[in-house]
Image (spheres, rainbow, N blue to C red):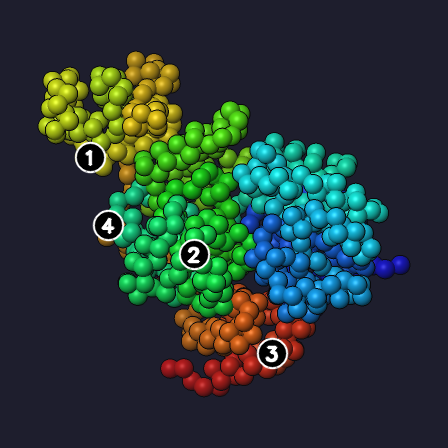
Amino acid sequence: MFDSRANASALLHSVFGFSAFRPGQEEIVDAVLAGENVLAVMPTGSGKSLCYQLPAIARPGLTLVVSPLIALMRDQVRALTAAGVAAGSLNSSNEPAENSRVMGLLRRRELRLLYVAPERLARPDTVEMLAESDVAMMAIDEAHCVSQWGHDFRPEYLTLGNVARQIGGRLQTLAFTATADAPTRNDIVDKLFAAPPRVFVRSFDRPNLRLAFKPKERSSRQVLSFVRSHEAESGIVYCASRRKVEELAEALKAAGVNALPYHAGLDKAVRDANQDTFQQQDGVVMTATVAFGMGIDKPDVRFVCHADLPANVEAYYQEIGRAGRDGLPADTLTLYSLGDMQLRRLQIEQSESPDERKRIERQRLGALLALAEAPRCRRQTLLAYFGEASQPCGNCDLCQEGVELFDGTVDAQKAMSAVVRTGERFGMEHLVSLLLGERTENILKFNHDRLPTFGVGAGRKAGEWRSIFRQLSATGLIAQDLMEHGRWWVTDEGWRVLRGQATIELRKDMATGAAAKGSKRDRKAAAASAVVGEADAALFDALKALRTKLAQEQKIPAYVVFSDRTLAELATHRPSSPRAFREIHGVGDAKLERYGAAFLDVVQQYTTTPTG
């Protein structure tokens, strides 16, 4: 009898070059090899793709991979092909010659994995072709797209359950997603599976990612400072608008950063060229709208910066998850302001979504604001949102830089009194001026200098009062009417605090300036030493240069040649023979044959030549 489990273990090493599974993979692979239908919720970077790729080549038959992300199809097909696996995709971006090649492999039953978009799979001719192609398994990526409760609903996903039945036979169905709460998981099960599948929900923790939030001060300078602390490293800067994408790209380039823009308004040829440069070269920073990164499998993104507040916690989690997929240290920073909060709320209220959907979106935004203004470990707050308990992580800004809490009840009462005594008609800047006792034009126009609250907050700075207003908003004590110039009003919970029936703890703003800059330098040094030691840095750089050269010659992403982790192990262990090279993480048989001699030659040069 064919032992697919033993075959899979051998292929894990010979094809993918891995000596062991990542946490959470093995149990899922075993279930798939046993023929079970599976729903797996696994964090970005945890190795979801291996859970269907390995069974696909360990057993006979074709595996159909459904994904809405053309970039992911292209990247995974390249990586599989480089590893010696017969894989292909059918999508609108293919050249005719590539589609012809894939169809030939399909007709000859030589293809092991076929990637298709859900729109193409909905075509009757595609279903008829697949019904005659010995499809054994259908793996549905980004499965949350089937749920109207998910954050990225796509109506075409609703047809996939019916398509599986049309293809025929006892088609095994797998569904994968990085983010799905309980209602979304239930929706996925109902709409994609004929019977309840085996469900795996893995930890959402990504301990290699450092989490940080900062209130916006001068956001362009904050972004530049963060990017400069990651010199010569690949990273992504997300912006809320196309205009800001281009402005930030220009500002970074003017400061000597190799930065490129990416958004839907750019010419497709420019977008594709910028994406290829980001994937094929080291040290490129992409400033982009959130459309960029979906399906990008680049494992060595060392940082993600949000120049504007993301849409919700799920979006934030997915977007920061594009950093550090190789398991090495990576850095994240999210900048936010009251204006960002107002914009996100306005987007929800002005959408054409039903009331129940708006209610869910308000809750999700509230959770993100609570994360931004968290008084203690951010990872604890983030994981709690996904239903996980954890200890303080030691790898977020609040754990590392500290935050001081204080009884903020009196300050909250002063702020809310200012809101009430001005008739709940004014925005934050007017209220801050009132609390500080500033006789601005509007303060005098409305005679607000005569109010009892005029000047009662003079003991604090304007920035401190803005922080207090943000925290009161994040905790639901005050709210804004976004349709009327952002005027504030006090909620029922706020009235409880205002009347002395409840108390509230607030946090002081974290240290900024020289101390924070010093900590960034320390983090950069710590991240560098975690990749390779000082003695191996020159060899590591030489290996990266060779990787870049090979990637550009072959017009493939650099990580398809080898990942940063592979290069780091080469620089550290310095193998002297093909056999020793083969034991390095990520080196399979096909890559050993294709690249082994060139990389061994560089290792030999640095092993025999003194480096000082």
Which is in the foreground here, disc 4 or disc 1?
Answer: 1
Mark 2 nearby-residue class (10 Å; few <14, some 14–19, many ≥20): few
Question: Is residue 443 among what the camera can see?
Answer: yes
Q: Nearer the viewer, mark 2 or mark 3?
A: 2
Q: Residues within 10 Å of mark 3 (few under 14, many from 20)?
A: some
> Reading the chain from its start, which is encountered first: label 2 or label 3?
2
Using a 10 Å C-alpha cutoff, classify the residue at mark 4 as few (fewer than 14 neighbours), some (14 to 19) or many (20 or more).
few
Per the image, the residue denoted by label 4 is 513
Q: Which amino acid does the dot numbered 3 rest on?
A: Gly
Query: Which residue is label 3 attached to?
Result: 596
Marks 2/3: CA distance? 39 Å
Mark with earlier residue (4, 2):
2
Which label belongs to residue 425? none
Across and down, in percent, residue 218 comes to 26, 47
Decide if residue 503 is in sight here: no
Q: x, y percentage for residue 155?
A: 62, 39
Callout 2: helix, strand or loop?
A: loop
Q: Distance of mark 3 from mark 1, alpha carbons?
A: 61 Å
Q: Is residue 547 above or below residue 28?
A: below
The residue drawn where x is 60% and y is 78% is 596
The residue under label 1 is: 462
